Image: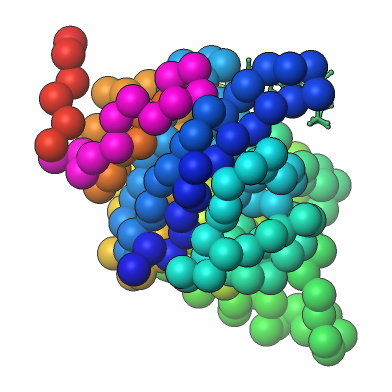
Amino acid sequence: GAVLAVRDVEKTYASGTRALRGVSMRVLPGTVHGLIGANGAGKSTLIKILSGWQQASTGTVEWKDQPVDWSHPRQALAAGMAAVHQHTPLVDAMSVVENVFLGRRETRRWDAAARRAELLALCDRIGYELEPHQAVAELSVGARQMVAILQALARNPDVVLLDEPTAALSPAEREVLFRSIRRLRDAGTTVVYTSHFLDEVVELTDHLTVLRDGLVVVDAPTADVTVDS
Ligand code: ADP
Ligand code: ADP
């Protein structure tokens, strides 16, 4: 079954805007699932609902075939759903390794050697090299993005939700990111990936859900989707 699903989700904001108008979607484990739509289509609203930042007005969210009612992002994270938002805050004055493990509840005291080894193992999983003790302030935009992704992976999630991760990247950085996402997927991590560029996700994703004005207009394996150029 699906690792994550939404069923008949509606979201009407206090302003009266119907951001989602009966959205259903199933994310299969071990896939890269693209969530596409122009500005205003409802992507952010859906992502907030999936990651516990907001609740649907009606409809259900299912995690591993069970209805869930995440009222706080902490609950989604504890279940195994980690989101990387466009502006994931990193602490510039701290090192890569400190940022990656920032906020993770530690049961034991900080063990520098163990954390460094764990970071290098995480880097290996995505095929990306970072110097653990480098200050985050010195990193490129692309490398900072990778630190944000590693911060999510440090929670050992089943699903990683990447919200417009290429928005600030150069084409070369984008290729590096795509390679990392494929590696993650091939190792069994499910990736939900949002973008407003359809062509870019056709290259990367296994399944596409396209939103327009709060409605699902395309929901199909990427191989079955024809892109007009
Ligand atoms: P709700 O309206 O369901 O309580 P939020 O608490 O997320 O939703 O929103 C708080 C307020 O933020 C909204 O009522 C609105 O005035 C404002 N707001 C935030 N983002 C937007 C947006 N993209 N368009 C319009 N208003 C927004
Ligand atoms: P996208 O991420 O695809 O650009 P959004 O989910 O941000 O779409 O927005 C969908 C619709 O809901 C838009 O019309 C937007 O203005 C509105 N909206 C988003 N957030 C809020 C909010 N907090 N309060 C009121 N309206 C909102």
Which residue is at 53% across, 70% downward?
Answer: 66
Q: Position of residue 37 (x, y in %)?
A: 44, 23
Snapshot quadrant of residue 27: bottom left
> Where residue 187 sits: x, y (%)?
34, 69
Question: Is residue 213 inside the magenta stretch?
Answer: yes
Residue located farthest toward the top when viewing the structure as drawn: 229
Q: Residue at x 64, y 32 (%)?
A: 11
Q: Residue at x 57, y 16 (%)?
A: 40
Q: In the rendered view, does 41 fall on the left or right side of 83?
A: left
> Is residue 186 among the parts visible in the rendering?
yes
Residue occupying the point 42% across, 36% down? 35
Horizontal relation, residue 19 to residue 202: left or right:
right
Q: Quadrant of ligand 2?
A: top right
**Any part of residue 129 in sight:** no
| Left or right of 204 in this view: 163 | right
Choose between 160 and 97: the one closer to the eye: 160
The number of numbered discs placed on residues in the rendered structure image is 0
**Quarter containing the N terminus:** bottom left
Q: Residue 151: image x %, image y %?
A: 65, 58
Above/below status of 80 relative to 172: below
What secondary structure do most residues of the magenta stretch adopt?
strand
In the displayed structure image, the side of residue 60 where residue 188 appears, left or right: left
Looking at the picture, does residue 203 appear above or below residue 115? above
**Residue 31 image-quadrant placement:** bottom left
Magenta segment: does it hold 150?
A: no
In the picture shown, does residue 228 fall above or below 217? above
Nearer to us in this view, 138 or 76: 76
Q: Which residues are magenta?
A: 212-223
**Residue 100: horizontal and vertical position, in percent?**
69, 61
